[in-house]
């Protein structure tokens, strides 16, 4: 049933997207590892890590598009779920350092030794095992989203009020993780990672493998989203987006549908954060900043809300522009440029890049090439303008 649903849900655009991601996930690591340095086709290691970060952002954008584009839930706090997944992976990476830290403590991370911790906090236990950390990557963001969504959706909080509450949630977590006594490194966060599953994090092979794994995760996340939005569940989500009160009057438990998709979206964001941390090499409270969540929403708006492919495309395009413009004389003006981009897209391309392209393509497709000849055969012609 599930393979049939996935096959049925893939159109030409989705298939092309999956092929491009799969090709990048295979060819870029091979180019980095097999071709000699200095070759025109060789991808440097720093670019592998940079593009791996873009892929993680694309997964985050997919998670936002799933709830905003198809269910009408505008979350301005999804950066919190992204950061929680990153911290779960960071805790595992910190436990792998062992005696190679600055203070040589086999149990306590360096920041805990510096802050005079006498023992490892209870919530750090178990993170020396990868399977436990991987479980927490899904469980912690998912549990937070479930509790938050149950309270918010049960109270029928919608629209701008829900957006403000999600933003307040991520800001509260930002303040909490900044505290040194919270047990997560305070302002400096978690860094100086050594190994992941026994492999050196800084090695070229490890970075190539992380990039390929990120591409695989993007493909799986896209397939899950397509399966959801193409099913009967997806039709109900769209109905909730367009007319929530009418959908509720028809007998659907709107709160349950919204809670499910919100929790699923948070788990996807947590996976994106977990893949992001070993490639970037650090996780700190700045990832909880509300501005990061707002910027992720802009990625979706630029690429095309309610298209999935457009959300991933928007994440890559906007972040590539950010990398390009923040490395030159325009760096101080990047936020102004980002705001201007959002305003221009809203006014000129309200459906985003991909949404506008799809509209144009649909209009061209409806105008069949044989329409004029058929009209002439029937003796019907369009009136000509008077000269």
Image (cartoon, rainbow, N blue to C red):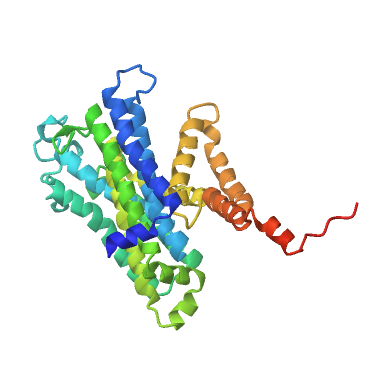
**Residue 268 x %, y %:** 32, 54
In the rendered view, would you say 164 is above or below 277?
below
Q: Can residue 313 be seen in this view?
A: yes
Residue at the farthest right position: 387
Residue at figure coordinates x 33%, y 32% from the top left: 28
Residue at figure coordinates x 37%, y 69% from the top left: 233
Camera-nearest residue between 73 and 104: 73
Task: Tell whether 187 sits left or right of 240.
Answer: left
- For the N terminus, give its image quadrant: bottom left
**Residue 309 x %, y %:** 44, 50
Q: Can residue 181 be seen in this view?
A: no
Residue at the farthest left position: 106
Task: Tell whether 271 sits left or right of 15.
Answer: left
In the rendered view, would you say 113 is above or below 172?
above
Residue at figure coordinates x 48%, y 68% from the top left: 241
**Residue 183 x %, y %:** 22, 47
Residue at the farthest front position: 377
Residue at figure coordinates x 48%, y 66% from the top left: 161
**Residue 7 x %, y %:** 34, 57
Give the tally of numbered discs: 0
């Amino acid at each position: 049933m599930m393979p049939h649903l996935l096959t049925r849900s893939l159109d030409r655009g989705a298939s092309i997207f999956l092929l491009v991601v799969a090709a990048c996930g295979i060819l870029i690591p091979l180019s980095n590892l097999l071709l000699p340095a200095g070759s025109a086709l060789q991808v440097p290691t720093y670019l592998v890590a940079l593009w791996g970060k873009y892929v993680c952002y694309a997964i985050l954008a997919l998670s936002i598009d799933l709830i905003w584009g198809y269910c009408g839930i505008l979350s301005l706090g999804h950066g919190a779920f992204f950061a929680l997944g990153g911290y779960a992976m960071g805790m595992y990476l910190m436990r792998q350092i062992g005696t190679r830290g600055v203070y040589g403590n086999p149990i306590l991370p360096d920041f805990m030794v510096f802050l005079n911790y006498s023992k490892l906090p209870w919530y750090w236990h178990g993170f020396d095992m990868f399977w436990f950390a991987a479980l927490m990557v899904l469980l912690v963001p998912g549990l937070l989203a479930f509790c938050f969504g149950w309270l918010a959706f049960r109270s029928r909080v919608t629209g701008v009020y829900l957006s403000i509450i999600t933003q307040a949630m991520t800001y509260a977590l930002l303040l909490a993780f900044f505290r040194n006594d919270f047990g997560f490194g305070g302002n400096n966060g978690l860094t100086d990672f050594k190994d992941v599953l026994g492999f050196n994090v800084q090695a070229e092979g490890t970075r190539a493998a992380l990039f390929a794994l990120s591409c695989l995760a993007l493909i799986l996340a896209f397939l899950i989203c397509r399966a959801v939005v193409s099913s009967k569940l997806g039709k109900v989500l769209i109905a909730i987006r367009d007319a929530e009160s009418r959908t509720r009057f028809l007998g659907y438990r709107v709160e349950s549908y919204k809670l499910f998709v919100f929790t699923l979206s948070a788990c996807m964001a947590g996976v994106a954060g977990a893949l992001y941390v070993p490639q970037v090499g650090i996780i700190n409270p700045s990832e909880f900043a509300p501005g990061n969540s707002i910027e992720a929403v802009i990625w979706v708006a630029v690429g095309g809300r309610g298209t999935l492919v457009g959300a991933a495309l928007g994440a890559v395009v906007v972040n590539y522009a950010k990398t390009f413009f923040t490395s030159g004389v325009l760096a101080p003006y990047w936020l102004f440029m980002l705001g201007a981009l959002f305003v221009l897209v809203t006014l000129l391309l309200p459906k985003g890049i991909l949404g506008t392209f799809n509209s144009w393509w649909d209009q061209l497709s409806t105008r069949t090439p044989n329409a004029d000849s058929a009209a002439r055969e029937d003796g019907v012609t369009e009136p000509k303008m008077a000269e």
